[in-house]
Amino acid sequence: MFYIFAIHFNTTHSLSKVKQNKLIIIILVTTFVMYNYFVYTQTSIEPTQKLSELAIKGQQLYQENNCTACHQIYGLGGYLGPDLTNIVSNPIKGPEYVKAFLNSGVKSMPKFNFSENEKEAFVQFLAEVDKTGYYPNYKAEMQPDGWVKLMYKTNE
Ligand code: HEC
């Protein structure tokens, strides 16, 4: 649209070349400023998922004990142990299974010495992570247009 203006001025000879260039620069700078204003002031509409207090404690313990060195959440982390994204909702695993693993030192997993409350915090953290989606996402569907539609637990 701005270019059409510029061409219009050019053909009518109503402005000098210098004025015309100034006008173009002003228009471009204004567009740039407006564009940046909209891009950087736009806030996300989606509310972010909030962890409960117990889950935050679990997350802190998860970080302090470096569980991520061997375990993944959504596929991210070390690969010595399995992914823990959906372990709580897993029908053959679940909360008691998680607790049992923490202090038993199976294979190369260290034998920790967590209290019952700390174990609860781990379970709560992993349960809240679990609610956010699937990994791997077996519920993904291929759309006719070639895009993959992922299924999230929050929109079920
Ligand atoms: C040094 C590596 C290592 C660290 C650190 C580690 N783990 Fe593990 N973990 C493993 C391995 C290896 C297994 C698999 C053991 C098996 O299948 O017999 C495992 C298994 C598990 C399982 C059972 C997973 C399943 O699907 O069967 C849970 C739950 C778990 N770990 C939680 C944790 C938590 C929580 C922490 C942090 C406090 C942690 N681990 C730290 C190596 C580790």
Image (cartoon, rainbow, N blue to C red):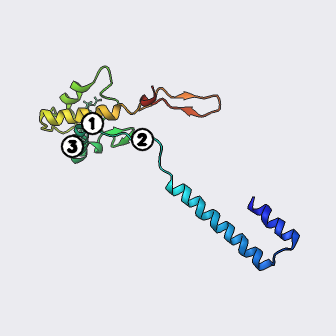
Is residue 58 visible in the rendered image? The answer is: yes
SS at badge 1: helix
- Dot placed on the residue nearer the N-terminal end, 2 or 1: 2
Say which residue appears at 21% left-offset and 47% top-offset.
64
Label number found at residue 47: 2
CB at mark 3 closer than 8 A to ligand 1? yes
> Which quadrant is home to the C terminus?
top left
Instruction: Specify the amino acid type for callout 2.
Output: Pro
Whole-number angstrom distance, CA of label 3 to CA of label 1: 10 Å
Q: Callout 1 environment at 10 Å: few (<14), some (14 to 19), or many (20+)?
A: many
Kindly tell me whether residue 83 is visible in this rendering.
Answer: no
**Which numbered disc, 2 or 1, marks the residue closer to the eye?**
2
- The amino acid pointed to by label 3 is Leu
Task: Tell me the element at label 2.
Answer: loop
Mark linked to residue 61:
3
Q: Position of residue 148 (x, y in %)?
A: 56, 33
Between disc 3 and disc 1, whose residue precedes?
3
Q: Position of residue 119 (x, y in %)?
A: 18, 34
Q: Quadrant of ligand 1?
A: top left
- Residue drawn at x 32%, y 25% as measured from the top left: 89
Residue name at image x 15 percent, y 38 percent: 112
The answer to whether marks 3 and 1 mark residues whose Cβ atoms lie closer than 8 Å is yes
Farthest residue in the front direction? 14
In the image, what residue type sits under mark 1? Phe
* 63 versus 95 height, above or below: below
Residue 3 placement: quadrant: bottom right
Side of 97 relative to 147 (left or right): left
